[in-house]
Image: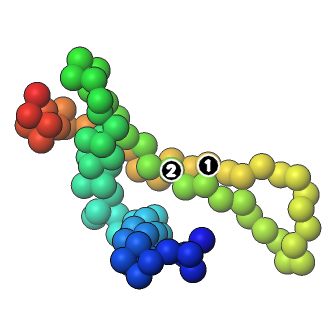
């Protein structure tokens, strides 16, 4: 819970939350390639098995007013597919 965190921890966590909230919107599509490449960098742990593609997805459930839980599942939509630049990742990792 945010109220249990120190000021410094709140700043870091809220800053990250706001970034991911805004990244999701179509207005920020220019940031998607950079974000996807960064996620590939963070996920790559085996030098012999580089990531080839990153998919950014939205997860949501549509609600109708008044809200009635009809048992329907959350929907998942891939809104961006990124072909990973492996040579750039190798350079970043120093591999």
Q: Which mark is residue 29?
A: none
Above or below: residue 36 compared with residue 84: below
Instruction: Check the image and tell me how it is coloured.
Output: rainbow
Q: Which mark is residue 57?
A: 2
Question: Is label 1 in contact with label 2 (beta carbons under 8 Å)?
Answer: yes
> For this rendering, which residue is in front, 19 or 12?
12
Indicate the quadrant where residue 18 lies: bottom left
Q: Is residue 72 visible?
A: yes
Q: Position of residue 32 (x, y in %)?
A: 32, 57
Residue depicted at 36% across the width and 77% down the height: 8
Give the labeled residue for mark 1: 76
28 relative position to 70: left or right? left
* Quadrant in which the C terminus appears: top left
Residue positioned most to the top: 48
* Mark nearer the N terminus (1 vs 2): 2
Residue at disc 1, secondary structure: strand
* Quadrant in which the N terminus appears: bottom right
Residue depicted at 57% across the width and 50% down the height: 77
Q: Is residue 83 visible?
A: no
Query: Distance of mark 1 from mark 2, alpha carbons?
Result: 7 Å
Q: Position of residue 36 (x, y in %)?
A: 32, 49
Residue depicted at 61% across the width and 54% down the height: 59
Residue depicted at 27% across the width and 49% down the height: 38
Q: Position of residue 28 (x, y in %)?
A: 35, 69
Q: Position of residue 65 (x, y in %)?
A: 85, 77
> For this rendering, which residue is in front, 46 or 81?
46
Indicate the quadrant where residue 7 lies: bottom left
């Amino acid at each position: 819970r945010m109220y249990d965190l120190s000021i410094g921890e709140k700043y870091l966590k809220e800053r990250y939350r706001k970034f991911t909230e805004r990244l999701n919107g179509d207005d920020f599509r220019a940031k998607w390639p950079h974000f996807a490449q960064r996620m590939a960098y963070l996920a790559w742990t085996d030098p012999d098995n580089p990531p080839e593609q990153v998919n950014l997805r939205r997860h949501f459930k549509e609600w109708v007013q008044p809200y009635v839980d009809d048992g329907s599942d959350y929907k998942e939509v891939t809104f961006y597919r990124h072909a990973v630049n492996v040579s750039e990742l190798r350079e970043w990792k120093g591999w």
